[in-house]
Image (cartoon, rainbow, N blue to C red):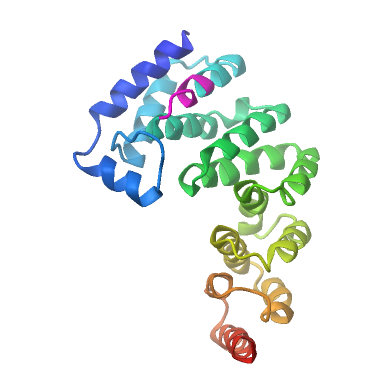
């Protein structure tokens, strides 16, 4: 497979599926510096699945080459396709590929690319290779907000299932709880919200002594699926703390 040529053919297919008028609106919404074709996420996934079927014997080396070729051009949909290839072919990835994933997260600078890289790609790698938790420890204290956000979201999938390392998440979240970055506040609330579906007691116990530090964004997300009495008690404590400031 000639990765650059194949990546260019994927771009042409993506461009052919673009929705008129979508590109400028999406570019403005995401505050993106990339070129946008105007292709929807479902259409991108359809193209990626078709491309994968065309190369059923794709190996690790070819996957990485294709991802890099797609990412090399500053086109939003090409980069989305690169991320979708990493998700679709995640079983081919090795522990050392976390370095590539980190590189892509740093270059993404938008939730539209970062969140899938964090939840589905990094999360899968960490579940399959627990030694990579040390990478998440480093990410959690990184200067880049998208890397910090990714350290939280990489733990999401097992927590959503009622499993996972809540203690590690709680350590990261506690260190970031006072941050003013919206995307950090939202990520903390998101993970707490999903965890609460299976382990509401755990979320309530962790959040109750921190209502004076958590942001409104974090609180509203975190309490969404708690039973009403607990939800109301936490929000009342949060509002009381805000009023006292």
Location of residue 192 (image quadrant):
bottom right
Residue 4 is left or right of residue 12, and the answer is: right
Residue drawn where x is 69% and y is 48% of the image: 143
User: Magenta segment: does it hold 86?
Assistant: no
Give the residue at the far top of this rendering: 2
The structure residue drawn at horizontal position 55% and vertical position 58%, both measured from the top left corner, is: 183
Front residue of 172/231: it is 172
Residue 40 in percent (x, y) is at 31, 40
Q: What x and y, as percent, mark residue 101?
A: 62, 34
Q: Residue at x 62, y 63 (%)?
A: 188
Does residue 137 lie above or below 207 as drawn?
above
Q: Is residue 80 left or right of residue 133?
A: left
Report the side of 239 relative to 212 (left or right): left
List x then y, in percent, for residue 238. 61, 84
Q: Residue at 55% of width from left, 75% of height from top? A: 216
Above or below: residue 170 compared with residue 205 = above
Q: Quadrant of residue 22?
A: top left
The stretch of residues the image draws in magenta is: 68-74
- Judging depth in this view, the residue of 123 and 174 nearest the camera is 174
Q: Tell me which corner region of the image, top left, top right, bottom left or bottom right, holds residue 195.
A: bottom right
**Location of residue 208 in the rendering, given as x and y in whole percent from the top left corner:** 70, 81
């Amino acid at each position: 497979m000639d990765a650059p040529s194949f990546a260019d053919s994927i771009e042409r297919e993506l461009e052919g599926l673009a929705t008129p008028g979508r590109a400028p609106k999406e570019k403005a919404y995401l505050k993106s510096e990339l070129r946008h074709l105007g292709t929807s996420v479902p259409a991108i996934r359809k193209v990626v699945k078709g491309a994968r079927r065309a190369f059923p014997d794709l190996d690790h080396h070819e996957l990485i080459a294709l991802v890099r070729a797609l990412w090399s051009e500053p086109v939003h949909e090409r980069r989305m396709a690169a991320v979708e290839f990493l998700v679709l072919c995640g079983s081919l990835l090795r522990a050392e590929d976390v370095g590539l994933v980190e590189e892509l997260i740093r270059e993404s600078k938008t939730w539209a690319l970062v969140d899938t890289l964090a939840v589905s790609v990094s999360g899968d790698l960490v579940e399959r290779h627990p030694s990579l938790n040390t990478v998440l420890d480093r990410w959690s204290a990184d200067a880049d907000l998208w890397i910090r956000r990714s350290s939280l979201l990489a733990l999401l999938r097992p927590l959503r299932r009622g499993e996972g390392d809540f203690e590690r998440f709680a350590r990261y979240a506690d260190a970031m709880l006072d941050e003013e970055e919206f995307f950090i506040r939202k990520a903390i609330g998101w993970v707490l919200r999903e965890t609460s579906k299976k382990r509401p007691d755990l979320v309530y116990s962790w959040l109750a002594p921190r209502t004076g530090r958590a942001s409104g964004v974090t609180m509203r997300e975190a309490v969404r699926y708690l039973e009403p009495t607990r939800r109301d008690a936490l929000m009342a404590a949060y509002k009381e703390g805000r009023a006292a400031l």
